[in-house]
Image: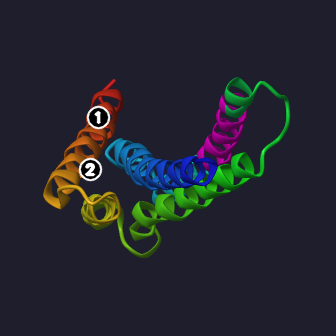
Amino acid sequence: MIKRVSSISYFRNFIFGVEDGLVSTVGLISGIAVADVPKETIFVTGIILILVEAVSMAAASFLSENSANEYIYHKDNVDKNSIISSLIIFVSYFLSGMIPLLPYIAYEIDFAFKASIIITMISLVFLGLLDGKITKTKILTNIYRMTIVGGLAIAVGVIAGVLISGI
C-alpha cells in the first residue's frame, strides 16, 4: 500500500511540475513580451520565475507530503518519499519551465513569442499523451484537457500583459 501511495505521489508531482512549469512560464513571459520590454528583461524574468517556482513548489510538496504522512501515521518524522516527491517536482518544473523560455534565447521577441506558445502547446499534447498512457485512460481526453486548461492559463498571461502594458 505504501509503495502504491508513493508512486501516485511521484506521478502527481511529475505531472504537476511539468504542467505548471510549462504554463506558468509561458504565461508570464508571454505577458511580459506583449508589454514591449527588452528581450533581456523577458529572459531574466523567466529564469527568476523558474528558479523561484521550482524551489517553492519543491518546498510546498515536501511540506504537504510530510504533513499528510504525519496526519495518516500520527508521528513526526521526515519521510524519504517526501524528499523524493519534492525533488521530482523541482526537476520537472525546472526542466519544463525552460522549454517556453528557449526561443527567447535564439530569436527576436515577435518570433520567440509565437514559438514559445507553440512549443508549449505541443509539450502539453505530449504530456496529455503520456498521462493517458500511464493512467490507461482516454488519451484524447487527456490531451484535450491538458491543452485547454494550459491554453486558458496562457491566454490569461497574454491578456494581462496587453491590459497592463496599456496603462
**Left or right side of 6 for 38:** left
- Which numbered disc covers residue 146? 2
| Residue 13 higher or lower than 134, as above or below | above
Give x and y (percent) for residue 135: 33, 57
In this view, the residue in front, 7 or 88, is: 7
Q: Amino acid at mark 1?
A: Val
Is residue 128 in view?
Answer: yes
Given residues 101 and 15, the one toward you in this image is 15
Residue 143 is situated, as x and y percent measured from the top left of the image, at 21, 56
Place of residue 72 in the rendered image (x, y in percent of width and height, measured from the top left): 67, 28
Q: Which residue is mark 1?
A: 156
The span picked out in magenta is 51-68
Front-lying residue, 1 or 151: 1
Nearest to viewer (mark 2 / mark 1): 2
Circle 1 — which element? helix
Q: Residue at x 28, y 28 (%)?
A: 163
Residue at mark 2 to residue at mark 1: CA–CA distance: 16 Å
SS class, disc 2: helix
User: Is residue 53 part of the magenta span, yes or no?
Assistant: yes
Q: Quadrant of residue 106?
A: bottom left
Q: Quadrant of residue 118?
A: bottom left
Q: Nearer the viewer, residue 9 or 1?
A: 1
Look at 19% across and 60% down and name the residue there.
139
Residue type at the position of mark 2? Met
Mark 2 / mark 1, whichever is N-terminal: 2
Q: Main secondary structure of the magenta part?
A: helix
The image shows residue 133 at horizontal and vertical percentages of: 29, 66
Report if residue 56 lies within the magenta region: yes
Classify residue 50 as left or right of residue 80: left
Q: Tag 2: Cα neighbours inside 10 Å, few (<14), some, or many (≥20)?
A: many
